């Protein structure tokens, strides 16, 4: 706390003291008290007042410093508030404690409701995957354009179910990461395999050669990221190719689709942002790339995008932070 701020807070007290001093001075002056006798008590009172102000300012600075430290700590440490200096400080501290207790109660209630919601959606995801699996088995026994298209649609439904669960678990303790060394080619092949039917049915060519790269990551969540990116590449590519390759320690997934508007690129990883392409494709939710960004950040993988309208999009996943040398 600055001295000016402290004096402003005490201005009423200082003004009252000055008024009383003037009144006493006038009374003594009118009583023919000699001027020299008037000066001594006023000088002493002035010095004592300065000492009191200095002591009060020191206490106030100490209290403000303690409050500043407590403000950066958790609400559980509210009992460490400084001793109240004024009667009203007691009531202020009671209000603070009451608000902290209410906040803790609300947090506990929210955690319980959040846990119940996760349990419900986990059960829902498990139940909905059962009929999806049954339908896939039925269509796999047929070989027609309708069955192939239905299988592609069912795979996308499964992907959307996984997106829902990932979004719900993103900020929860159940977002488990198991970081190990993995062969990147096995993760790529696993991700591409989910879309093999769509590549074939739509006549989109996949350009991929083994990258022979080892990475320190969670293979489950990196595969999720890759599936989201490949899914977007197929969604916005009517014809042409999807290419998967390495640029030093950066995994690149490049398509020849419609591309992204230059103004939309800085916001492409924001939650719920769909941009110009999203206005044309009403199915876009703006969640897929947001999830990819969050998961990559949590695993120290960088992710960026390069795109031009009408030329295609390249998503780059920087794995250099977690590269393991190949023996």
Image (cartoon, rainbow, N blue to C red):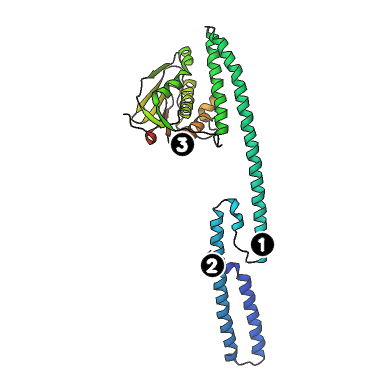
| Marks 2/1: CA–CA distance | 25 Å
Q: Can you give x and y, in whole percent of width and height, for residue 204 in the image?
A: 44, 16
Q: Relative to residue 201, is residue 315 depicted above or below? A: below
SS category of the residue bearing label 1? helix
Q: Mark 1 points at which residue?
A: 90
Image position of 274 (left or right of 262): right
| Near-viewer residue (3 or 110) | 110
Q: In this view, does 51 lie to the left or right of 217?
A: right
Q: In this figure, which residue is indicated by the disc labeled 3?
A: 297
**x then y, percent, for residue 81:** 60, 59
Q: Which residue is label 2 attached to?
A: 4
52 up-or-down from 83: above or below: below
Q: Which of marks 3 and 2 is nearer the N terminus?
A: 2
Percent of width and height locating residue 101: 66, 50
Residue at figure coordinates x 60%, y 70% from the top left: 11
Could you give the CA–CA distance between mark 3 and mark 2, rounded to whole angstroms?
46 Å
Q: Which of 316 and 217 is in front in this view?
A: 217
């Amino acid at each position: 706390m600055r001295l000016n701020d402290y004096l402003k807070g005490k201005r009423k007290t200082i003004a009252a003291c000055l008024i009383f001093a003037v009144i006493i001075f006038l009374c003594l002056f009118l009583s023919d008290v000699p001027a020299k006798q008037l000066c001594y008590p006023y000088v002493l009172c002035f010095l004592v007042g300065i000492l009191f102000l200095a002591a009060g300012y020191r206490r106030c600075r100490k209290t403000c410093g303690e409050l500043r430290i407590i403000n950066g700590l958790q609400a559980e440490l509210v009992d460490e508030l400084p001793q109240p200096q004024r009667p009203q400080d007691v009531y202020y501290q009671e209000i603070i404690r009451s608000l902290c207790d209410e906040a803790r109660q609300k947090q506990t209630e929210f955690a319980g409701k959040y846990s119940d919601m996760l349990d419900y959606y986990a059960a829902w995801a498990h139940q909905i995957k059962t009929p999806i699996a049954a339908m896939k088995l039925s269509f796999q026994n047929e070989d027609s354009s309708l069955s192939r298209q239905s299988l592609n649609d069912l795979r996308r439904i499964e992907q959307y179910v996984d997106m829902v669960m990932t979004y719900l678990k993103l900020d929860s303790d159940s977002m488990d990461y198991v970081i190990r060394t993995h062969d990147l080619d096995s993760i790529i092949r696993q991700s591409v395999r989910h879309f093999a039917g769509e590549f074939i049915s739509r006549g989109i060519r996949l350009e991929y050669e083994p990258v022979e790269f080892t990475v320190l990551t969670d293979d489950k969540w990196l595969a999720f990221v890759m599936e989201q990116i490949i899914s977007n590449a197929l969604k916005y590519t009517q014809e042409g190719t999807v290419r998967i390759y390495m640029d030093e320690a950066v995994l690149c997934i490049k398509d020849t689709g419609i591309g992204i508007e230059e103004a939309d690129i800085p916001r492409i990883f924001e939650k719920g942002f769909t941009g110009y392409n999203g206005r044309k494709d009403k199915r876009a939710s703006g969640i897929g790339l947001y999830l990819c960004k969050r998961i990559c950040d949590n695993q120290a993988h960088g992710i960026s995008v390069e795109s031009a309208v009408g030329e295609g999009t390249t998503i780059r996943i920087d794995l250099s932070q977690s590269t393991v040398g190949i023996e």
